[in-house]
Amino acid sequence: MFITEAFAQTAAPGGAAGGADILMSILPFLLIFVVMYFLIIRPQRAAMKRREELLKNIRRGDQVVTGGGIVGKVTKVVDDGELEVEIAEGTKVRVVRSGISEVRVKGEPVKE
């Protein structure tokens, strides 16, 4: 009389229902992880690879845009980490390769 039906029910013998309950409780988290992997993590890794290739292939004569928005022409590749960029006639600055935000190859029209 005082025991409700929910409390009166018992688990299935052998614990089979307990294993299924655990699987059903973990399944949404696995699905969320899979969706996040394909929508966020995988495209971000591909973009990072493209950026690394872009920065690695900078050569003399390329027009570049720095992270601060300064447009210049690469006059010298100092080493793996630095470039010498001419930002005005006779004005050359050394720029860290990772500070380049965009590479505009010779002859490429300016995007507007």
Image: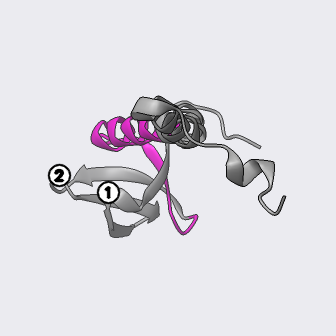
Q: Residue at left 36%, top 50%?
A: 74
Q: Residue at left 58%, top 64%?
A: 69
Question: Is label 1 in contact with label 2 (beta carbons under 8 Å)?
Answer: yes
Front-most of residues 98 and 15:
15
What amino acid does circle 2 point to? Asp
Label 2: which secondary element: loop
- In the image, 61: left or right of 22? left
Front-most of residues 39 and 91:
39
Is residue 12 at least partly visible in the picture?
yes
Q: Residue at left 30%, top 36%?
A: 57
Which residues lie in the magenta part? 43-69
What amino acid does circle 1 point to? Arg
Q: Callout 2: few (<14), some (14-19), or many (20+) C-alpha neighbours within 10 Å? A: few
Q: Quadrant of residue 107?
A: top right
Residue picked out by circle 1: 97
Most extreme residue toward the right is 1
Is residue 46 at least partly visible in the picture?
no
Q: Position of residue 41 (x, y in %)?
A: 48, 41
Vertical side of 86 occupied by 12: above or below:
above
Vertical side of 89 occupied by 52: above or below:
above
Q: Position of residue 1 (x, y in %)?
A: 84, 58
Front-most of residues 10 and 101:
10
Quadrant for the C terminus in the image: top right
Residue picked out by circle 2: 80
**Magenta run includes residue 56:** yes
Front-most of residues 92 and 68:
68
